[in-house]
Amino acid sequence: MTQFIALFGEAIAFGTVILFGALGEILTQKSGNLNLGVPGVMYLGGIAGLTASFLYESAVANPNPMLCLLLSLIAALAAAALGGLIFSFLTISLRANQNVTGLTLTIFGGGIANFFGGSLNKLAGGVGQISVSVTSHAYRTNIAPLMKLKIGDFPIGQMLFSYGFMVYLAIALAVVLAIFLRRTRTGLNLRAVGENPATADAAGISVTKFRYLATTIGAAVSGLGGLFYTMDYIKGTWANEGTIEALGWLAVALVIFSTWKPLNAVWGAYLFGGLSRLWLYMPGLNRSSQELFKMLPYLVTIAVLIVVSLRKKRENQPPAHLGLPYFREER
Amino acid sequence: MQYAVQLRGVTKTFGSVVANNNVDLYIKEGEILSLLGENGSGKTTLMNMLSGIYFPDKGQIFVHGEPVSIASPKAAFDLGIGMVHQHFKLVDVLTAAENIVLGLKDKDGYKAIGQKIREICDKYGFVVNPDQKIYNMSVSQKQTVEIVKQLYRGAEILILDEPTAVLTPQETQKLFSVMRNMRQDGKSIIIITHKLHEVLEISDRVAVLRKGEYIGDVPTSEATAQSLTEMMVGRAVKLNIDRPEPVNPQKRLEVRNLTVLNSDGLRALDEVSFDAYGGEILGIAGISGCGQKELLEAIAGLQTPAMGSSISYYPPDSDKASNLVGKSPLEISRAGVALSFVPEDRLGMGLVGSMGMTGNMMLKSYRSGKAVFTDRKSPKELAQRIVSQLEVVTPGISAPVKQLSGGNVQKVLVGREIAADPKVLMTAYAVRGLDINTSYTIYHLLNEQKKNGVAVIYVGEDLDVLLALCDRILVLCAGRVNGIVDGRSTTREEVGLLMTNLKEVSPNA
């Protein structure tokens, strides 16, 4: 039982990182841009948030938690958005190949983040010495009375309410994104851009504007995944072990798994989170067999791909123009 | 009289290609204007400048007398100009209503939108279900959505680019009656079409372009098919299709009880039996989607016939028939059965858009190179020969074929199939979207093949052409052979009736 509750908590934590990444990428892909730089922008978001609060906390004697929160949040959003902006400029304005640009962005983001992570370590006086306790505490504050809620012996409060606000922010974002895409005119226009930009263009929609905005905002949202990981999961330090990148790729897989639907992404994210941590809770695994368990999220994604393509439902297919540049006067 | 639109001295170039040179054109309010010209004469480019897709290099456009600059599609429909493109601009996974309001700034809910759509439909005589998804629609339904979309946006000037190319005669008539309703309502319509009888039927005035230059205009009442063709081509053209008597016809293909199931398990072809002879042209008529595609593909080996089907091929140099069922497309084409199929989107089957002509010739010949290297020389010569014989307009044989205009793409496709020296040549919609002059070039090519003893199977849409070109006409109806008639003695009415009324199959037959 305790094992299950611990795994559930990990599923939520990892799931939230993946969910932010996937939500941003859904928004991006709906515009027809395939940004494989998700791990990169998550790195950027994580390191920028950490750097901002580290500098602030070490500059003042009594850091204001609210200000810590705000500064790191803004820094993370801005840095990740900048990553998306670079991607947009290269692929939309210069019509560079999206796959190559995205992969480059991932390498770039990882490099930048680890460079600054190393620098912060040095400033802090050694590896593992970075501490932004006030900020991290602010991120991990939960609603204490709700946490104690129990149904009989079952610690429902601990399972559902023991997390920082970003867990719930991710779910709220998913709902907002779903309504935006399904119910609003702007969402309709965005879908049209991703499906058939020539049609959208002829209907008077600015393809360039929509793609820039969706990709930049999408990257900013993805960047929150990195921020959540550094501030909440590893409690405000820098770990150079590649987890963010691994979760970033899972976020890309989740976009496919969810068939581009934000609400599917929510439960999918927790499933992925749980599956990717399951190996820790399986008894008797050795070095090689635990790797098999780490593959589970990808296996599930492949299974979903097979089922979706067998069912041939048009609504579940990727945006028709995904990954392709658009140029009006091209024949 | 005020002009709805006037173009003065409009010029547009793409690189070194001059698509439009100093064109003057006007259209009055409440008028239907036909824009006529050969393939590649710049009609679509000119209209794209009106609809904001392209921007003119030189010249001035006036709308209702005011000089305007149309920099984007949005600017065009702010001026009341709407264009229905040859390739529909619709998003497949959205509904009709969603497509219609795409990009609009109003705040209407879908109920109000549906109401407004119904009002437009009632006014002009359309039928549209606002909640139907585009991918569930037929070509003609999609076109209706496109037109309603333009009217919904308040288009006063409507441009239709080859609207009838993919419609059946009945659907065309429906479209024409809608167009007349719109003219009644004071709207101006520019229609691009290659079918001269349609030009004469629907339009008030005809304007002609030739090689990007404006030639002139005539009121339709003073025009004939002959005079329009001469304006278009620039010289007298004979509008008769030759039909030499078949010489020494020999059986080449014997099809018996050919049945093909479609993906839903229904019979796309139902017990089709016929013979094709060398030295004759066998026409295949039928409403679109009655099994024409499946028939040709089954013979070419691209579809798997059901059990009990037999397709026998009699090569000219031996008496032994070979069964084509179960053979691979490569074996069948090596045996001398060629298929040149021109799909609705032209490039979809047979050519690779991003490759040049040489590369596309090589699709058929790449296996014949020595060792690991391919032979590029003979395909290159073949490409050059096709360019000069069929008068293909292209910047060069290495230019990607998708950059050529539709008619020229078709010439490349048909030219390549004929060059393979087939014994049986199957063509489907070989003249789809082609101008008169090029169409006649193709008919002439087919007749030449016929004289060489090739068995030609011609799937066509235009009944008049089928009646003038073919020795025998097989009429398909709902996947069955509904009759095989003699091309010389039959009438339009007889074939039309066979196309639409399926004869009861008597149990003894």
Image (tube, rainbow, N blue to C red):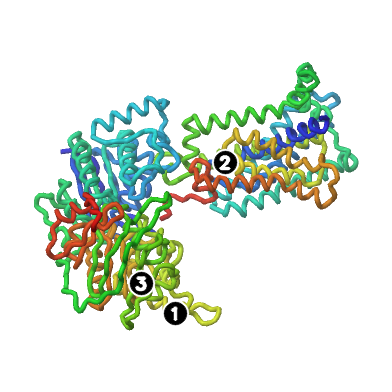
Indicate whether B120 appears above or below B399: above
Q: Amino acid at mark 1?
A: Lys
**Of the pair B479 and A143, the residue shown nearer to us:** B479
Outermost residue toward the right in this view? A125
**Disc 2 and disc 3 in contact, CB within 8 angstroms:** no
- Both marks 2 and 1 on one chain: no
Category of crowding for the residue at label 3, using alpha-carbon neighbours closer than 10 angstroms: few (below 14), some (14–19), many (at least 20): many
Residue bearing mark 2: A259
**Disc 3 and disc 1 in contact, CB within 8 angstroms:** no
Q: Quadrant of residue B72?
A: top left
Q: Position of residue A191 (x, y in %)?
A: 49, 39
**Of the pair A299 and B412, the residue shown nearer to us:** A299
Q: Position of residue B332 (x, y in %)?
A: 40, 72
Mark with earlier residue (3, 1): 3
Q: Is residue A235 left or right of residue B164?
A: right
Q: Amino acid at mark 2?
A: Thr
Q: Quadrant of residue A10?
A: top right
Residue bearing mark 1: B377
x 13%, y 50%: residue: B220
Residue bearing mark 3: B337
**Quarter of the figure with the N terminus of chain A:** top right
Q: Is residue B203 left or right of residue B94?
A: left
- Both marks 3 and 1 on one chain: yes
Is residue A40 in view from this perspective?
A: no
